[in-house]
Amino acid sequence: MAISKPTAERLSRLALLLEQQSEENTPITSAEIEVLTGWASHTIRKDISSLTKTSGIATNTGYLPCELAKAIRETLGFAGTEQNCCIVGLGRIGSAFLDYKGFAESPFTIRAGFDSNVNRVEILKADFPLYPTFKMKEIIPRLGISYAILTVPAEQAALAAERLIDCGITGIVNFTPVLLPAPPGVEIEQVSILDALGAIAARRSINTKE
Amino acid sequence: MAISKPTAERLSRLALLLEQQSEENTPITSAEIEVLTGWASHTIRKDISSLTKTSGIATNTGYLPCELAKAIRETLGFAGTEQNCCIVGLGRIGSAFLDYKGFAESPFTIRAGFDSNVNRVEILKADFPLYPTFKMKEIIPRLGISYAILTVPAEQAALAAERLIDCGITGIVNFTPVLLPAPPGVEIEQVSILDALGAIAARRSINTKE
C-alpha cells in the first residue's frame, strides 16, 4: 500500500477533525468535509479509498465519523497505541499548552514538561509532572516519550533539539522561529506565525493575479 | 506568469528565511537551502526560476540572500508595502506575541491587539496599541489592517472570525482548534499543535512502511 505524504497528512487531520465532532456520529459527506477543510471532495474520496480497511465506514448518507477516524488511525499505524509527548520550554507559549483541552480526544498525550528554570517547574501546575531540563535523559525513555513540543527561546532551540534527539525523541513540533535540520529518522514540523502569514499573503497574491 | 500555490508558499517561506539570515549576504546554494528547509534542491531551483525578475540574484557561488528575498517579495506582490496585522484575543498564546521579535525583519507589522476583557487591555504592555474588542470596527479600517491572528478561546472563534471579516480582514491565522470556513476573498490558515503532531505521525508511519 502506497500512501503519499500529502494524503497521510490530510487523513491525519481528517481523523482529528472527526474525533472532535464524533459525539453524535451523524454521517458526514465528502462535500461536507470539503466545506470544513477546503480540500476538494474528489481528493477526499480518493484519500479515503486508499485506507487499508474501508468496509463499514460508508452509509447511504455519508461516512460514519467514528468508524472513519478509526480506519484512518489503523492505516496510519497508531490505532490503540498512545503517542506520548513532552513540552520543552515552559514560557508563555509552552505554558499555554498546560491546560489545552484539545489533546483529550486525540491519540496524543502529554506526559511531561521540562524547563531549565527550576523555579518555574515548581510553580506551574499541570495534569502531568514537570521536571528541570537536566532530567530529560532519564525521564523521556522511562515514560516512552517520542514527541517533543519545542517552545524554548530561539537562541536555545538548536541545542535543545540536539539533546532531545539524543534522548530518543523522533518527532519535534518546532514553535521556535529557528529552522532546525532533521537528521535521518527524525521528523520536524515547524509551526510559525510568519510562515502562516506568508502562506496567506502568497495565496492572496496569486488570487489577485488570476 | 503562473505560480502554483505550493511554489508561492515555499517562496514566501524562503524569503522569510533569507531575511532572517541576510546580515552578511553571503551567497547561498540550492543545496544549502535544501538542508535548511528539507525541499529538494531541484524544486528550489524551479521555484526560483519562476520569479518575474531573476537577473542579479545568482552568483557563481550561489544566490545572494538579500536580492533573492527582494525578488520573491516583488513577484509575490508585496515588496515595499507593509502588511498590517492585529492580534485578536490576548490570553496566554495571544499575549505571547506581544513581545515576539520575529516580525522585525518580516514584511508583517502588528498594528493593534484586541481583547474583550477591558482590564487585560489596560494591564498588558505592547509596542502597539491595545483596544477592547468593540472598537474593532473603527480601528481595523483606520489602521489599514488586513490580517488577523486569532487567539481567542475555541468557543468564541467562529463569532470572532465573522466579525473580523465584517471589519474588512481578508487573512486570518487561526490558532484556535476550531476549523473555520473561509468565505470567498478570505484566506484562513490554521495553526494547530495537533495537526503538527498528526503530520509527523503520518510521515513516520509512511517511513516505517517503506
Image (tube, coloured by chain):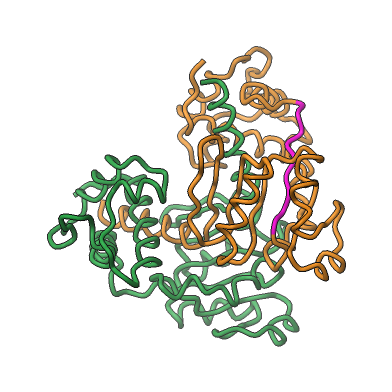
Chain colours: A orange, B green
Residue in the foreground of this view, choosing between A187 and B49: A187
Q: Is residue A130 magenta?
A: no
Give the residues drawn in magenta, as a range. A80-88
Residue in the foreground of this view, choosing between B158 and A130: A130
Place of residue A51 in the rendered image (x, y in percent of width and height, measured from the top left): 58, 19
Place of residue A184 in the rendered image (x, y in percent of width and height, measured from the top left): 51, 36
Question: What secondary structure prevails in the magenta region?
Answer: strand
Residue B105 sits in quarter: bottom left
Residue in the foreground of this view, choosing between B139 and A48: A48
Q: Is residue A27 left or right of residue B206?
A: right
Q: In this view, does B191 lie above or below B18?
A: above
What residue lies at 42% left-to-right and 57% top-to-bottom? A200
Place of residue B145 in the rendered image (x, y in percent of width and height, measured from the top left): 46, 74
Residue in the foreground of this view, choosing between B96 and B168: B96
What residue lies at 65% left-to-right and 33% top-to-bottom? A15
Q: In this view, does A171 lie above or below B96?
A: above
What residue lies at 55% left-to-right and 23% top-to-bottom? A48
Residue B57 sits in quarter: bottom left
